[in-house]
Image (cartoon, helix red, strand yellow):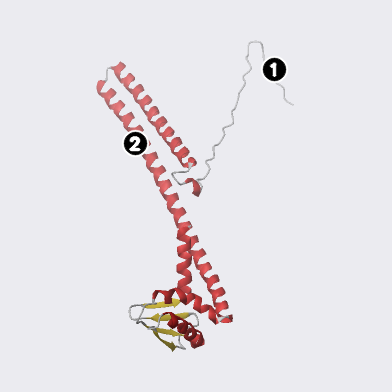
Amino acid sequence: MKQTTTTAGEKRKIVVTKAVSHVHSSPIAVDELSPDNPAYKLRQKDFETLRQKVIATAQAEAAKIKEKAYQAGEQEGYAKGYQDGKLQGELLATKLEQEAQQNLANSILTAKKYISAKKNEIVAFAVEMAEAIVQHRLDEKPAEILSLLEPILFKLEKPDQIITIRAHEKYHELLAAKMEEKKKEFLNLRYIILNDKQMSPYEVTVESNESFETLVLQEELHKFLVRLGEKE
């Protein structure tokens, strides 16, 4: 090991180094983007503090320029230096503010697009699942179609109406029995049931003198799930 000695006239030099800590900024979470979130308000407060510090630093530099120009008797330089320093500080603060606002707007837009895309995927998947379940039930129990038609028939229950129902032939007897029950409630009710082999087993149309209603299973399920999502 190498040894060094110092004389009485020499002073030992001690070099002290200080580790510089790096501050890592945490990313903004989606739930922090709401103005009502306390974290959002805290970030806004931190930004305002930074802005004030920048302006204060710029003003201090401008004051130094002012003092130097005054002592040298350069009034023109003093005025220009003061204004330049102040202007630079304001420009820097404005730039920081614009960048922060743009970053915030971009984050909000990205979050909205993500939520919207996921919502559409969820609705589409739910429609497929619900459609498969209902179709299976209709295949096993065709009478289930009557519960789906009930809201449509209820809207058309008026005296002296002629109701035309067009559906797959597998539902003919069920629909005829249902309409006979309705006829007991509305004596003047008249109906026609038409078999249509080109229609799917999950599609029915009901037409009256005043309106035309269509029951398409996939469309009805999609409307129902969208309304359910809006309520939430």
User: Which amino acid type corresponds to the residue marked 1 in the rendered image?
Assistant: Thr
Q: Position of residue 196 (x, y in %)?
A: 45, 88
User: Which amino acid type corresponds to the residue marked 2 in the rendered image?
Assistant: Leu
Looking at marks 1 and 2 on the same chain, the residue that comes earlier in the sequence is marked by: 1
Residue at mark 2: 91
Marks 1 and 2 close (CB-CB < 8 Å): no
To which quarter of the image does residue 52 belong? top left
Residue 129 seen by the camera: yes
Q: Where is residue 69 in the image (x, y as percent from the top left)?
A: 30, 20
Q: Which of 167 and 192 is in front in this view?
A: 192
Left or right: 11, with 79 as reference point: right
To which quarter of the image does residue 206 belong? bottom left
For label 2, the SS is helix
Between label 1 and label 2, give the one nearer the viewer.
2
- Label 1: how many Cα within 10 Å (few below 14, some 14–19, many 20+): few
To which quarter of the image does residue 10 belong? top right
Residue at image coords 59%, 81%: 140
The N terminus - image quarter = top right
- Label 2: how many Cα within 10 Å (few below 14, some 14–19, many 20+): few
Label 1 to label 2, Cα distance in Å? 56 Å
In the image, is residue 153 above or below residue 97? below
Residue at mark 1: 5
Q: Residue 170 carries which label?
A: none
Q: Position of residue 142 (x, y in %)?
A: 54, 81
Q: Which of 145 and 16 is in front in this view?
A: 145
* Numbered disc total: 2
Residue 116 seen by the camera: no
Residue at image coords 45%, 39%: 41
Residue at image coords 69%, 20%: 4
